[in-house]
Amino acid sequence: MAFTRGYATRCYRQRRPITSAWSATIVEFILTLVMREAVAKISPSLARSMHLGTKGCICDFTDDLEEARLKVLSAFVCAFCREAMARDGHPFLADEVVRILKRDWFGPSDDPQSPAGISAKLGHNPFTTQGLQATQWDKFAEAAHGEIVKSIVKGIGLLVTASVLVLVSLSGFRH
């Protein structure tokens, strides 16, 4: 979670929406993390296992946002991890993990009986990413900052203009 919080903080400071590079929702990201930890508990050989390269597998580890996005959106368990799960006595675990990560069980948003439909009734669409929203205070501070800069530039312009006019008028009185 520290990776996500750090990325979100950087996006917020740069006033860049998370959705610019991240189309997975936080629900999907958390679901993937929870499933990864569940697999580690059930299959001991995968408890400390992570891939060196990115395959899009649930056991990938990366600090790169695009690779993390691939992991979250691909719903994939590689052959190495499938074999490890089978060796640990869970030959069908990989198929179940993939089924859960594909989120077909979540149902459509327009079905009032599905988890997605219930979530939509509560005002949250789990299939869209909204990114960070600026608070009213942040919007005010940003607008005020822009106005302050404009006022300073205007003031400097007026000061320079006044100074030039004073110098020209003073030099005209001397001759």
Image: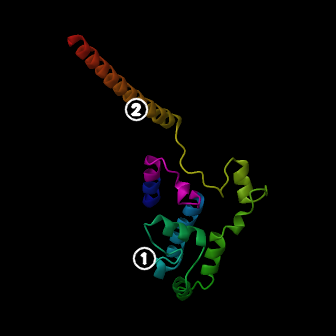
The residue that appears at 40% across and 32% down in the rendered structure is 149
Camera sees residue 35? no
Q: Is residue 104 left or right of residue 24?
A: right
Estimate the x, y position of residue 150 in percent, counting from the top left: 42, 30
Disc 2 and disc 1: Cα gap in Å? 52 Å
Name the residue at 46% across, 76% down: 47
Q: Nearer the viewer, residue 154 or 144?
A: 154
Establish if 118 lies above or below 163.
Answer: below
Q: Residue 170: image x %, image y %?
A: 24, 14
Hey, which quadrant is residue 63 in on the image? bottom left
Q: Secondary structure at mark 1?
A: loop
Query: Mark 2 or 1, which is nearer the eye?
Result: 2
* In the image, residue 15 lies in the stretch drawn in magenta: yes
Disc 2 is placed on an element classified as: helix
Q: Which residue is the site of mark 1?
A: 48
Eyeballing the image, is 117 above or below 33? above
Quarter of the image where the C terminus is located: top left
- The magenta segment is 9-26
Q: Amino acid at mark 2?
A: Val
Residue 15, position in %: x, y?
48, 47
Q: Nearer the viewer, residue 31 or 137?
A: 137
Residue drawn at x 45%, y 55% is 5
140 relative to 106 in the view: left or right: left
Residue under pointer 2:
149
